[in-house]
Image (spheres, rainbow, N blue to C red):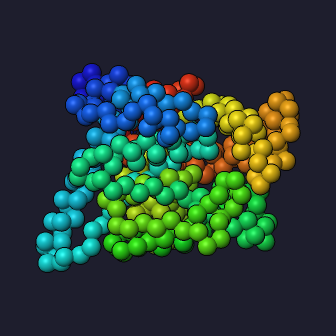
Amino acid sequence: MGSTATTAPLSRFLTFDREAWARLRDNTPLTLSEGDLDALQGLNERLSLDEVAQVYLPLSRLLNLHVRAGQGLYHASQTFLGNDAAKVPFILGLAGSVAVGKSTTARVLQALLSRWPSHPSVALITTDGFLFPNAVLESRDIMHRKGFPESYDRAGLVRFLADVKAGAPEVHAPVYSHQRYDIVPGAVQTVRQPDVVIVEGLNVLQAAPAGRDESQLFASDFFDYSIYVDADEADIQGWYVERFLRLRDTVFQDPLSYFHRYATLNEAEARATAADIWARINGVNLRENILPTRMRAHLILRKGADHRVEQVQLRRV
């Protein structure tokens, strides 16, 4: 790769700094405006058009190439089999910690990918919808482990992805409300044979532990490509605390919010509460379950303390 990338000895990944990665944009046009970006970014993350141009446009170009190659391979297989089967979507998995910015990344990629003419229909599914309802978590005494692998209906998520990959005309996913902090009874998100499905969640890259039944299916078994959004834990914790403060002043003020009890905390109390939640729950989940899946990703977006992507690691093909 010459001066455009470096690689550590025996590494499966090529490592690009931001400047080298930006050059891989080639002539990909910027199709988002400032107004588009305002609607896509998260509560505590300010994403610039420069960031989109330097990081996400090259990434959308790479993903476009993978989607087109996947479509070509699928059509070749169907020609060989003599089938005229339903269209099969390309599935992109997106993992990372709470507060690392993966939801914003997912929305930006959805917007960019849908502007490529060869795959205009791009659906975004979050695995929050596959969390067990609070009543189930409470009955199992694992409400304090919400977001950990055991708090998800993994069988339901696998069935959903299997149906998507089978080309089912319609597939339904449950809907989660962050305000209610629970599944919305009877609500569904319907996926109708899109070109691309982005699946975003904490533990989507999970696989069977060593020594366990390797015939068990996981969400990651259905991914055509996967991305991990990475940063130092200290930075992520700081972003989590700042987001908690923003939520205290906005969403938590709603009497219907599950976390309305935090709305009256002063700043010191709010920071202490957020730090405690991180120490007991989110930090533990990151270290035990999420971070160990990082090296399974095809691509890693590494963020600095300012929330900007400063390095990209691309797995060798």
Look at 54% across and 72% down and name the residue there.
156
Q: Looking at the picture, how far across and down is residue 220, in whole percent?
A: 45, 59
Quadrant of the drawing holding the N terminus: top left
Q: Looking at the picture, how far across and down is residue 185, in whole percent?
A: 65, 71
Q: Looking at the picture, how far across and down is residue 265, in whole percent?
A: 86, 37
Q: Looking at the picture, how far across and down is residue 189, in whole percent?
A: 50, 65
Is 255 left or right of 247, judged from the image as shown?
right
Res 239 quadrant in image: top right
In front here: 119 or 85? Answer: 119
Residue 75 is at least partly visible in this image? yes
Residue 149 is at least partly visible in this image? no
- The relative height of residue 82 versus residue 158 in the rendered view (above or below) is below
Is 163 left or right of 156, judged from the image as shown?
left
- The relative height of residue 160 versus residue 244 in the rendered view (above or below) is below
Look at 54% across and 53% down and name the residue there.
201
Look at 22% across and 65% down and name the residue there.
74
Look at 53% across and 56% down and name the residue there.
126
The number of discs equals 0
Res 96 quadrant in image: top right
In front here: 293 or 68? Answer: 68
- The relative height of residue 143 versus residue 297 in the rendered view (above or below) is below
Is 228 left or right of 272, judged from the image as shown?
left
Residue at far front of view: 35
